[in-house]
Image (cartoon, rainbow, N blue to C red):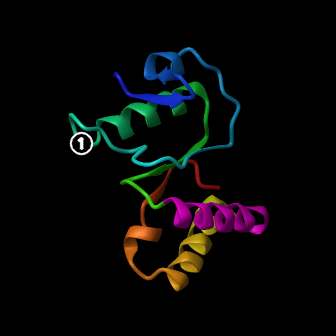
Amino acid sequence: MFSSIRLGTSLLSLFDLYQLQLNAELVTLSGCGTGMNVVVGGDELIGLVRGLLYAGAQTLMVSLWEIHDESTAEFMRDFYTAYKGAANKAQALREAVLSLRAKRPHPYYWAAFSLVGKFS
């Protein structure tokens, strides 16, 4: 319940998220470890995901572990390029993973991102 996202010098907490009303088709948390918690593994992923879905986000993309900056930038570019023409978010994720995997075969670089919520 004490999960938060650092925005500049302030924090957006789970409690703050429950007060928001979002009309967002996709919220991407591309920072390192947006699905991690130091104290209890998995807690932050559940907390932030639940909070953002409760606030009205239809789909979330989160990272499941600490991620590499350069490969994340490549992944996001590929994902959003694919998202423009893909049938759905899951297809765009698949295309971005395959593209990055061809350049960087180790799963550390391409397997960290997961979609939660509505994929269409």
Residue 81 highlighted magenta (yes or no): yes
Give the residue furthest to the right: 85
Position above or below: 57 against 64: above
Image point 68% across, 64% down: which residue?
77
Quadrant where the N terminus is found in the figure:
top left
Picture coordinates of residue 117, whole percent (x, y): 52, 46
Residue corresponding to mark 1: 41
Classified by dominant secondary structure, the portion drawn in magenta counts as helix
Q: Mark 1, residues whose alpha carbon is within 10 Å: few (<14), some, or many (≥20)?
A: few
Position above or below: 2 against 26: above
Picture coordinates of residue 58, whole percent (x, y): 61, 40
In the figure, residue 40 lies in which quadrant? Answer: top left
Q: Of the residues shown, which amino acid type is indicated by label 1?
A: Gly
Residue 113 highlighted magenta (yes or no): no
Horizontal arrangement in the rendering, residue 93 relative to residue 1 (left or right): right
Secondary structure of the residue carrying tag 1 is loop
Span highlighted in magenta in the image: 69-86
Horizontal arrangement in the rendering, residue 65 relative to residue 58 (left or right): left
Picture coordinates of residue 89, whole percent (x, y): 63, 59
Image point 47% across, 58% down: which residue?
113
Quadrant where the C terminus is found in the figure:
bottom right
Picture coordinates of residue 118, whole percent (x, y): 58, 48
Q: Nearer the viewer, residue 88 or 62?
A: 62
Give the residue furthest to the front: 9
Horizontal arrangement in the rendering, residue 4 relative to residue 89 (left or right): left
Image point 58% across, 63% down: which residue?
90
